[in-house]
Amino acid sequence: MDTRTTFAYTTGTFHLIRPGIWKEERDNGSPFNFIEVTRTTDYIELYDADRDLKARLYSNAGKWYHSPSHAWVMWPGSNGNWV
């Protein structure tokens, strides 16, 4: 059974609210809602339709899909872990 339900990073957390639904709570702003798109042994990929933003949560950091560069990059303060 996969026990990854909360990812804490430098300035916030991602919480699994119910199967397939995640909420990002940030220290400096309003929360954002995500749907789970993919779950692998390496990461969980999430999608925020309101912002057209993809995020991947790894064991030691988060990354988002950066449209201009078409690459997965770490956001400032994305170092974190599963808790």
Image: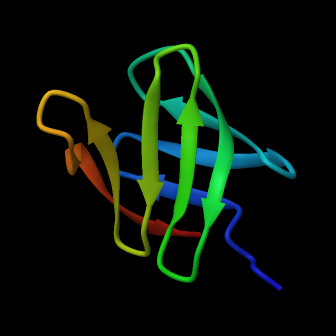
Residue drawn at x 57%, y 45% is 46
Quadrant position of residue 27: top left
The foreground one among 24 and 50 is 50
Q: Position of residue 50 (x, y in %)?
A: 56, 13
Residue sitting at the far left: 69
| Rendered view: 44 above or below 17 | below
The foreground one among 25 and 34 is 34
Q: How many marks?
A: 0
Q: Position of residue 30 (x, y in %)?
A: 53, 14
- Asked if residue 48 lies left or right of residue 76, the reply is right
Residue sitting at the far right: 18
Scheme of image coloration: rainbow
- Asked if residue 64 lies left or right of residue 40, the reply is left
User: On the rendered image, what quadrant is the N terminus found in?
Assistant: bottom right
Q: Position of residue 52 (x, y in %)?
A: 46, 22
Residue drawn at x 56%, y 37% is 47
Residue drawn at x 44%, y 16% is 29
Residue drawn at x 50%, y 69% is 43
- Asked if residue 5 lies left or right of residue 71, the reply is right
Quadrant position of residue 65: top left
- Asked if residue 47 lies left or right of residue 20, the reply is left
Q: Position of residue 83 (x, y in %)?
A: 59, 69
